[in-house]
């Protein structure tokens, strides 16, 4: 009896040993398969496309950081900007392995991307929904049909660039002249360089009339009148092409009294600033500023790196500053244009969740070091930049009009540029802006549109601006400067 129990236990123990051995063998077999399953080639891989080589190194570093945090590999592809969406569409339909899961595109292409299935509405995990992280201009730029179809990444806009060294010299000279004047007791306080940062073009013309320019200066104010990006601010506060988000076909307001007025003033400025549209371009304007020939100009954010690099190389011997775009005068306000480059999820992607994680990661990271590494200013709000000049563009961006995204108005900027060129050369402002409005409305409606002609407004070029404490030319006996080339 006792022997039988022992034998039974031995048999049970043997069975346990056999089962355990089998379990160990199975475990060994399973373990032998683990390296193959965890091999990097088997890990999830997503594709990110972009068109600007200036961000290649930055994206390479950031996607490696993303991989280290998430175990998701990101393959980057630099693609030509020509027919960019068409190339994405072709890859999405014909090459599943190379389909871009996410890509970077300017906001004016978002309607086309969304309607063709190449962009999807973002879920609330993406930071664009955090209103404290983006200004309204950034959110408008990526909105289509009341949906966020992209996450703002970086932007470009224009601002006022000025030679601060010259402003300090002019202020010092004016203060010295005032001190020597017989009626100097009428001057209540000294002029500072900040007092000469114009808030309007009227200010610039008044300054040109009141003060002598430094010896090397050829132009008080000079900008690229041939490019609509630098001209748009004149009319931007008074026209609407698609509403705030640039996607509303029922919100087209181009021809009105204020838009006529701004163009009439713009035309009259040709009397003060003789700028030949055929011989002047942005690069030449910037070179003249770099050489100290110009006090004020309109520039895009690329000017910061160009001037800073020139200063380090001993090719730019001045201090400079960035300010918001000037109004026209006390009656007519201005508003600049902006282009926002957005991170988009491809509607054909099989990895949308991972793509959303990637664009959220890139958007959040951009506010820390995007500008320092690429020269691109992050669309996400940042409190401070190491370079103080960036803030002027950040402020201008917040007040800007995002470039519209409607397919029917894709030629609007070319046509508006032609309109400005004709007005600058002397053609009737009322007629030109009316014709442009009729053309754009006809394109949208599909039927011929004729605008009722508005009465030509009486516009005072430069309503008087009073400077009670500033010495005039008669008080300082300094010669006037002219702005003719």
Image: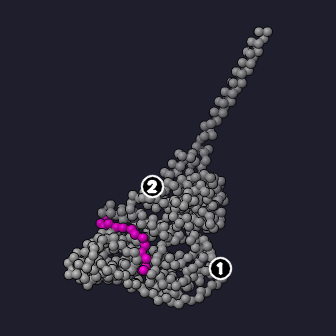
N-terminal label among 1 and 2: 2
Is most of the magenta stretch helix, strand or loop?
A: loop
Asked if residue 16 lies left or right of residue 156, the reply is: right
Q: Quadrant of the N terminus?
A: top right
Residue 46 shown in magenta: no
Asked if residue 72 lies left or right of residue 220, the reply is: right
Q: Quadrant of the C terminus?
A: bottom left
* Callout count: 2
The single residue placed furthest to the right in the displayed view is 1
- Spot occupied by residue 58 in the image (x, y as percentages of width and height): 48, 54
- Spot occupied by residue 473 in the image (x, y as percentages of width and height): 27, 83
Residue 53 shows in this picture: no
- Spot occupied by residue 404 in the image (x, y as percentages of width and height): 56, 71
Rendered residue at 36%/62% (across/down): 309
Asked if residue 356 lies left or right of residue 291, the reply is: right
Q: Which residue is mark 1?
A: 445
Q: In the depicted view, which residue is nearer to us: 312 or 1?
A: 1
Rendered residue at 49%/56% (across/down): 366
Rendered residue at 40%/69% (across/down): 323
Label 1: few (<14), some or many (≥20) within 10 Å? Answer: few
Q: In the depicted view, which residue is nearer to us: 466 or 118?
A: 466
Q: Which residue is mark 2?
A: 369
Residue 410: mark: none
Q: Which residues are magenta?
A: 315-330
Rendered residue at 56%/53% (across/down): 358
């Amino acid at each position: 009896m006792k022997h039988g129990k022992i034998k039974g236990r031995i048999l049970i123990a043997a069975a346990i040993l056999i089962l355990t051995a089998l379990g160990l063998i199975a475990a060994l077999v399973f373990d032998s398969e683990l390296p193959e399953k965890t091999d990097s080639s088997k890990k999830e891989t997503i594709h990110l496309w972009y068109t600007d080589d200036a961000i290649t190194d930055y994206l390479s570093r950031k996607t490696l950081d993303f991989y280290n945090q998430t175990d998701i590999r990101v393959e980057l592809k630099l693609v030509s900007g020509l027919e960019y969406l068409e190339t994405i569409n072709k890859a999405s339909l014909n090459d599943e392995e190379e389909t871009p899961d996410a890509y970077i595109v300017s906001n004016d292409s978002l309607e086309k991307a969304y309607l063709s299935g190449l962009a999807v509405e973002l879920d609330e995990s993406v930071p664009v929904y955090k209103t404290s992280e983006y200004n309204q201009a950034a959110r408008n730029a990526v909105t289509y049909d009341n949906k966020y179809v992209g996450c703002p990444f970086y932007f470009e806009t224009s601002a006022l660039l000025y030679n601060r060294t010259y402003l300090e010299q002019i202020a010092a000279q004016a203060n010295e002249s005032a001190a020597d004047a017989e009626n100097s007791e009428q001057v209540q306080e000294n002029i500072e360089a900040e007092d000469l940062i114009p808030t309007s073009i009227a200010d610039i013309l008044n300054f040109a009339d009141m003060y002598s320019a430094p010896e090397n200066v050829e132009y008080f104010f000079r900008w690229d009148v041939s490019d609509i990006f630098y001209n748009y601010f004149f009319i931007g506060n008074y026209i609407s092409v698609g509403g705030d988000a640039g996607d509303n076909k029922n919100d087209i307001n181009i021809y009105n009294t204020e838009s006529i007025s701004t163009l009439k003033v713009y035309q009259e400025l040709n009397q003060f600033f003789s700028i030949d549209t055929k011989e002047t371009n942005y690069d030449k304007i910037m070179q003249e500023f770099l050489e100290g020939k110009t006090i004020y100009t309109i520039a895009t954010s690329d000017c910061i790196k160009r001037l800073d690099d020139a200063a380090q190389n001993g090719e730019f011997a001045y201090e400079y500053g960035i300010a918001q775009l000037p109004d026209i005068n006390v009656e007519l306000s201005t508003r600049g244009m902006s282009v926002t480059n957005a991170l988009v999820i491809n509607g054909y992607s099989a990895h949308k969740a991972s793509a959303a994680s990637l664009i959220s990661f890139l958007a959040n990271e951009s506010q820390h070091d995007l500008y320092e590494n690429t020269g691109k200013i992050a669309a996400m709000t940042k409190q401070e930049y190491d370079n103080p000049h960036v803030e002027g563009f950040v402020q201008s961006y917040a007040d800007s009009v995002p470039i519209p995204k409607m397919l029917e108005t894709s030629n609007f900027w070319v046509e508006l540029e032609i309109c400005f060129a004709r007005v600058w050369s002397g053609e009737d402002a009322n007629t030109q802006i009316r014709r442009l409005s009729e053309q754009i409305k006809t394109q949208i409606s599909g039927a011929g549109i004729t605008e009722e002609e508005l009465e030509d407004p009486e516009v005072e070029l430069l309503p008087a601006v009073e400077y009670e404490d500033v010495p005039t030319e008669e008080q300082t006996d300094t010669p006037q400067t002219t702005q003719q080339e």
